[in-house]
């Protein structure tokens, strides 16, 4: 008879060996459909609370990560500049707030066309993924953010994205007229530098 502890250990082993976050369905594909994966995940998450690594859920996918207060032990202290064009930054924001969204819908929201390269850059970064085709004429491909996007920005889910009031409080939308004038006066493909630290185990 299968032991519950064996199921927990199997789920733990699968997640530990995986290089990418895994959904419950993907875990079941490895450990078997008869395993109570949610219960095993809950048990593991509790077991790793306060330890050097923790089990976290990001966008309905699970993975192990270094405890935030210990990350500096595994980080090489150097900054890497990741350059995104203004079009890429705006496109990423639209996808995050409206996903799943097609290219035509992104262009309608931005008011200008986007080059295919813009979406390619976001997918190469691992922050955006194809999310299937919409059941509409032409069956356009839609896009959505990834678990890597959530992890990079420290979000548990898209519900943690700042709302309009939060953006206004941070001064990002205040005053809105000045912000729109600034956006309108800049080259669509002007580059923005986003500084991020790369964690290297």
Image (spheres, rainbow, N blue to C red):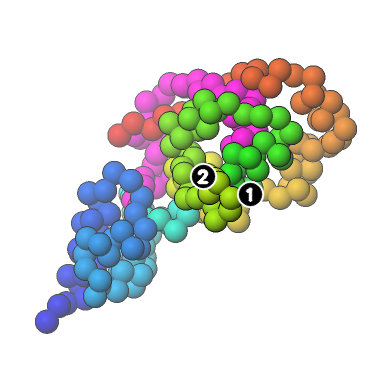
Task: Residue at 79%, 24% (x, y): give it.
Answer: 184
Which segment did they paint magenta? 63-92
Task: Residue at 58%, 50% (x, y): give it.
Answer: 137
Q: Is residue 188 left or right of residue 145?
A: right
Mark 2 vs mark 1, CA separation in Å: 14 Å
SS for tag 2? strand
Q: How many marks?
A: 2
Can residue 158 be seen by looking at this rendering? no
SS for tag 1? helix
What residue did someone put label 1 on?
98
Q: Is residue 95 above or below residue 117?
A: below
Q: Residues within 10 Å of mark 2 (few under 14, many from 20)?
A: some
**55 drawn magenta:** no
Q: What is the residue that sits farthest to the left in this orientation?
A: 1
Q: Are marks 2 and 1 in contact (CB under 8 Å)?
A: no
Q: Which mark is residue 83?
A: none
Q: Is residue 65 left or right of residue 172?
A: left
Quarter placement of the N terminus:
bottom left
Q: Is residue 170 left or right of residue 132?
A: right
Task: Residue at 43%, 31% (x, y): give it.
Answer: 124
On the image, the x and y values in percent for residue 113 come to: 66, 29
Q: Is residue 73 above or below residue 3?
A: above
Q: Is residue 119 above or below residue 167?
A: above
What residue did someone put label 2 on?
141
Task: Residue at 27%, 54% (x, y): give it.
Answer: 15
The mark that comes first in sequence, 2 or 1, is 1
Front-most of residues 12 and 87: 87
**66 drawn magenta:** yes
On the image, the x and y values in percent for residue 172 come to: 76, 36
């Amino acid at each position: 008879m299968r032991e519950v502890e064996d199921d927990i250990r199997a789920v733990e082993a699968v997640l530990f060996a995986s290089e990418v976050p895994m959904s419950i369905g993907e875990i079941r594909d490895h450990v078997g459909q008869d395993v109570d994966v949610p219960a095993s995940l809950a048990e593991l998450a509790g077991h790793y609370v306060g330890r050097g690594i923790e089990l976290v859920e990001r966008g309905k996918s699970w993975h192990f990560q270094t405890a935030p207060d210990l990350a500096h032990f595994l980080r090489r202290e150097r900054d890497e500049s990741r350059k995104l064009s203004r079009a890429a930054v705006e496109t990423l924001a639209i996808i995050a707030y409206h996903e799943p969204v097609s290219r035509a819908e992104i262009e309608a929201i931005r008011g200008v066309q986007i080059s295919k390269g813009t979406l390619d850059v976001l997918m190469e970064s691992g922050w955006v993924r194809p999310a299937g085709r919409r059941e509409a004429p032409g069956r356009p491909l839609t896009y959505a953010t990834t678990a890597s996007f959530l992890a990079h920005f420290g979000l548990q889910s898209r519900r943690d994205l700042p709302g309009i009031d939060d953006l206004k409080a941070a001064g990002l939308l205040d005053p809105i007229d000045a912000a729109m004038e600034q956006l309108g006066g800049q080259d669509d493909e002007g580059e923005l530098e986003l500084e991020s630290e790369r964690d290297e185990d």
